[in-house]
Every structure is written in C-alpha cells, then in structure tokens.
Image (cartoon, rainbow, N blue to C red):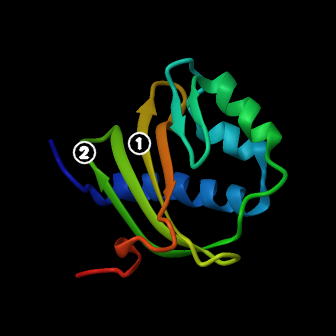
Amino acid sequence: MHIDDPAVLAEARALFDRYEQAIATNDGAILDACFWADPRTVRFGITEILYGIEAIRAFRASVARYAPRATRRVQITSFGQDFACTHLEYERTDSGLIGRETKIMARLPELGWRVVSAHVSLLAAGDPGRVQKG
C-alpha cells in the first residue's frame, strides 16, 4: 500500500477545500454533497452526535451560519488509492477558541470522494493545548 501518494493527497485536498468553502458560505447543498449519503455516515460535532445522513442533513438545515474561522494547520494522510484522513486546526475568529476537525474520506464506486465520518471539537478557553507545541 502506498501512503501519501501525491495524486491521492491532491484529490483529498480538493474535497477538503470544497467543504471548507461551503462552511464559509453555509452552502448546504455542497456540504451535503461532500458526505456519503448513507445511514452509516457519522458526524460528531461540538454540540451534536449524528448517526446517518438524515440526521446530518437535519442538523445542517438548522444552522443559520457557521462561526467564522481561520485555518491554523491542515494535515492530510492517504492510505492506498481510496482512503484519506484530513485534520484541520482552526481558530474561531469571533471568539479566539481553537477548533479541531477530522474527516475520514473514502473514494466510493461511482460517487468519488466522500466524507464517511467527521469529528469536530473545540478546546475550552483555559485548556493548555491552546498553545501549539512542537
């Protein structure tokens, strides 16, 4: 298995960038298209635990806008031709809180790249991890 194939990393980055642009503009159709439309898709958010695409869609429909954020770091790792993980560290520009987001992506037959699992979290204001180490 080839890890971090440049072409696969570029494909995963393209989906990552598409998703990030959709978050910034609250484009629900694009956000939905980035996720695997399946009951096995999972998204754990800051305030929600969502199992299945229908729960994810219902949550997205309830969001008026997402908090503005600035990227601090992105790390993407691919495994073979059809699997990648993206990791985003960001700062909410309205509050200064540090957020983290992990997406597991798979290349699915006839669909292309989709997020199959996502996890979003925030560090509390006093957490020692707020200062980047290393």
Q: Residue at x 29, y 55 (%)?
A: 77
Q: Residue at x 23, y 82 (%)?
A: 134
Q: Nearer the viewer, residue 121 or 73?
A: 121
Q: Residues within 10 Å of mark 2 (few under 14, many from 20)?
A: some
Q: Position of residue 17 (x, y in %)?
A: 57, 61
Q: Position of residue 15 (x, y in %)?
A: 54, 51
Q: Which mark's residue is nearer the viewer, 1 or 2?
A: 1
Q: Residue at x 41, y 42 (%)?
A: 104
Of the two numbered discs 1 and 2 on the same chain, state the one appearing first in sequence: 2
Residue 52: image quadrant is top right
Residue lying farthest to the front in this orientation: 126
Amino acid type of the residue tagged 2 in the rendering:
Phe
Label tally: 2
Identify the residue position indicated by label 1 in the image: 104
Residue lying farthest to the top in this orientation: 39
Amino acid type of the residue tagged 1 in the rendering:
Ile
Element on which disc 1 rests: strand
Position of 11 compared to 48: left or right?
left
Q: Position of residue 10 (x, y in %)?
A: 42, 59
Q: CA distance from mark 1 to mark 2?
A: 11 Å
Relative to 114, residue 54 above or below: above
Position of 54 compared to 87: left or right?
right
Q: Nearer the viewer, residue 112 or 130?
A: 130
Q: Nearer the viewer, residue 59 or 36?
A: 59
Identify the residue position indicated by label 2 in the image: 79
Element on which disc 2 rests: loop
